[in-house]
Amino acid sequence: MIDAVLVINAGSSSIKFALYSLVINKTSNAKEKPLLGGKIVDIGQCPKLYALDANDIDLTKNDLDVFNDQTTHEDLIQWLLDWISCHNHGYTIKGVGHRVVHGGRDFLTATKLTISVVTQLKELIPLAPLHQPHNLSAIEAIFNWAPKLPQIACFDTSFHHTQSTLAQLFALPREYSDKGIIRYGFHGLSYQYITSCLPEYLGTLSEGRVIVAHLGNGASMCALKHRQSVATTMGFTALDGLMMGQRCGSLDAGVVIHLLRCYKMSIEEVEHMLYHKSGLLGVSGISNNMQVLQQSNDPHAQQAIDLFCYRSARELASLVSTLNGLDAIVFTAGIGENSAQIREQICAQLTWLGVTLDLKENRKHNTVISQVNSNIKVLVIPTNEEVVIAEATQKLLASQ
Ligand code: AMP
């Protein structure tokens, strides 16, 4: 029997999962391959399962045909646990690691989950309404499935606790910052993974001034020095910063007041608009999916793409001042890893900084996509949040 850790990354419309052997050797990429891994996508529409074993054998059949748009995350987690048990080829799950988006001020490192920790994390739901409820429902489903199985939470906010007080403060009356209304930042597990890869690709430059652009359905950027977070575009919630699939990104707070006062919108209506109806979807009126927009001839689709790139270049430039210059940019996540066109359009707005893209290498999706003489190196590195969660879970289990 192989001892294994199960990793669950429960998002708003997908649940990613991976089963790793309990010992992970970060120096070898082959070891990062899970024993079993996959995702359930399109939750809330018509859920579909994709799963591969360690030999890349496709394990999916029409497993989820019984489910529909009413199927909840809880139902699917329950189903997934049974499915994993059925596909168990000789391993024992010794612990479960979860991605939890918001750890607030109290959770700065991976933490063993107890009823009281879960209660504290529930209080943070209003700060991450798209993700936190699903993260927590997966945890509760596993507590019901195997009450004694250790569960570990790994927080997206933790990576950013190295930021200075100045980088975290909003210009609000001090009593509100004292109560925790500060910038936390998110996508920390992704940034942690990328920082672990930087020495391999950048050598000593990895300790320099690097900006990572995590461009997926959710999107943010992080300014790194000595591979630690100095500043990031997301703030108190995951609504701030870049334009995203359905989220607006940075917005004049006066707009919210205006919607409440003059359009008589309720708080829930405003929240729904900003989290679900804005971003690429809102501007295009077509889709939150970048690939769909790139295939559309509708001028509003093009405008949404243009705004996404304009906002990305502008936010990136503002992070440069927090680093006093820039040595490298890393693109990651769904759009950052896969869309040469978006990388090209963003970098075209950064030539004044000394960014010179090698268009051929970019189109080939190579790791280094800048020209040899570019003042700023540009890289594409696929992210892997699940590996970070597996390692943290392994460490905590070993220490107990
Ligand atoms: P993520 O949230 O990291 O899974 O990223 C999802 C986003 O990546 C969606 O907007 C997808 O359309 C986008 N994406 C994935 N593959 C591609 C591609 N080949 N070209 C453009 N966008 C892509």
Image (spheres, rainbow, N blue to C red):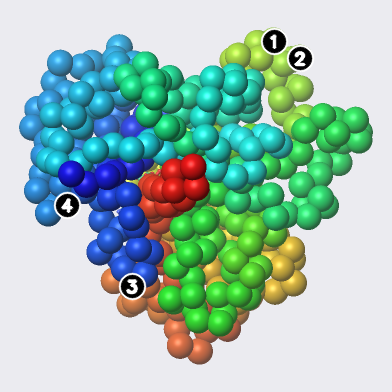
Image location of residue 183, percent across then percent down: 72, 42
Q: Residue furthest front?
A: 400
Mark 3 secondary-structure assignment: loop
On residue 54, the disc is 4
Q: How far is the residue under mark 4 from the one under mark 3?
A: 25 Å
- Please report contact status of discs 1 and 4: CB closer than 8 Å, yes or no: no
Image quadrant in which you'd find residue 49: top left
Q: Residue at 66% x, 14% y: name it.
A: 267
- Residue position for label 3: 366
Is residue 303 toward the left or the right of residue 31 in the image?
right
Q: Report the amino acid beneath label 2.
A: Arg
Q: How far is the residue under mark 3 from the one under mark 2?
A: 50 Å
- Residue position for label 1: 264
Q: Which class describes the residues within 10 Å of circle 2: few (<14), some (14-19), or many (20+)?
A: few
Q: Residue at 72% x, 16% y: name it.
A: 260
Q: Residue at 70% x, 74% y: name it.
A: 325
Above or below, 210 against 272 in this view is below
Q: Earlier in the sequence, mark 1 or mark 3?
A: 1
Q: How far is the residue under mark 1 from the one under mark 4?
A: 54 Å
- Please report contact status of discs 2 and 1: CB closer than 8 Å, yes or no: yes
Q: Nearer the viewer, residue 273 or 103?
A: 103
Asked if the beta carbon under badge 4 is closer than 8 A to the nearest atom of ligand 1, the reply is: no
Q: How far is the residue under mark 2 from the one under mark 1?
A: 5 Å
